[in-house]
Image (spheres, rainbow, N blue to C red):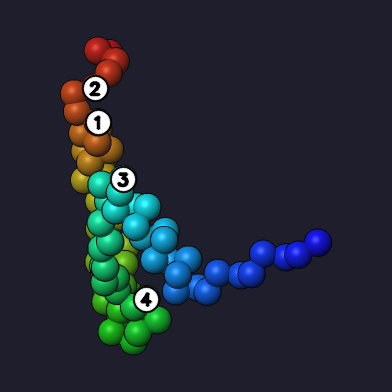
Amino acid sequence: MNKPTPVPGRERVAKRRAALRAEGLRPRQIWVPDVNSPEFKAEARRQSQILARHMAKTDDIAFAEAIQYWPPDDPD
């Protein structure tokens, strides 16, 4: 039996992209934070410390949870 010759990666990607475009889609590039950077880690730590300080304010948390789904499905 003869094996089919493999399609080079570039051609395979081009074919896939053409199929997606034919479906009305288009490629998009997005940038996301680098979670390993020192700046990201410092900012995440700063925000979590703020949140931790405010977690003691149970009234704020109860209010936020109460209005999370507004209007409520259950009329109770």
Instruction: Look at 25% across and 47% down and name the residue there.
Output: 24
Q: Which residue is mark 4?
A: 35
Left or right position of 50 against 14: left
Tag 1: residue type? Answer: Tyr
The answer to whether residue 36 is above or below residue 59 is below
Label 3 crowd (10 A; few <14 / some 14-19 / many >=20): few
**Separation of disc 3 and disc 1 at Cα?**
36 Å
Q: Nearer the viewer, residue 8 or 67?
A: 8
Q: Residues under labels 1 and 4: Cα distance?
A: 30 Å
Residue neighbourhood size for the residue with mark 2, other residues' Cα within 10 Å, grouped as few (<14), some (14–19), many (≥20): few
Q: Classify residue 49 by image quadrant.
A: bottom left
Foreground mark, 1 or 4?
4
- Name which residue type carries label 3: Glu
Secondary structure at badge 3 equals loop
The residue at 31%/67% (across/down) is 48
Question: Circle 1: is it few (<14), some (14-19), or many (20+) Cα within 10 Å?
Answer: few
Q: Nearer the viewer, residue 59 or 23?
A: 23
Q: Are marks 1 and 2 in contact (CB under 8 Å)?
A: yes
Mark nearer the N terminus (2 vs 4) = 4
The answer for how far apart the CA atoms under marks 2 and 3 are is 39 Å
Which of pointers 2 and 3 indicates the residue nearer the eye? 3
Considering only order in the chain, which callout, 4 or 1, is on the residue closer to the N terminus? 4
Say which element carries label 4. loop
User: In which quadrant is the C terminus drawn?
Assistant: top left
Residue type, label 2: Pro
Q: Is residue 36 left or right of residue 48?
A: right
- For residue 23, which numbered disc appears in the image? 3
Q: Residues within 10 Å of mark 4 (few under 14, many from 20)?
A: few
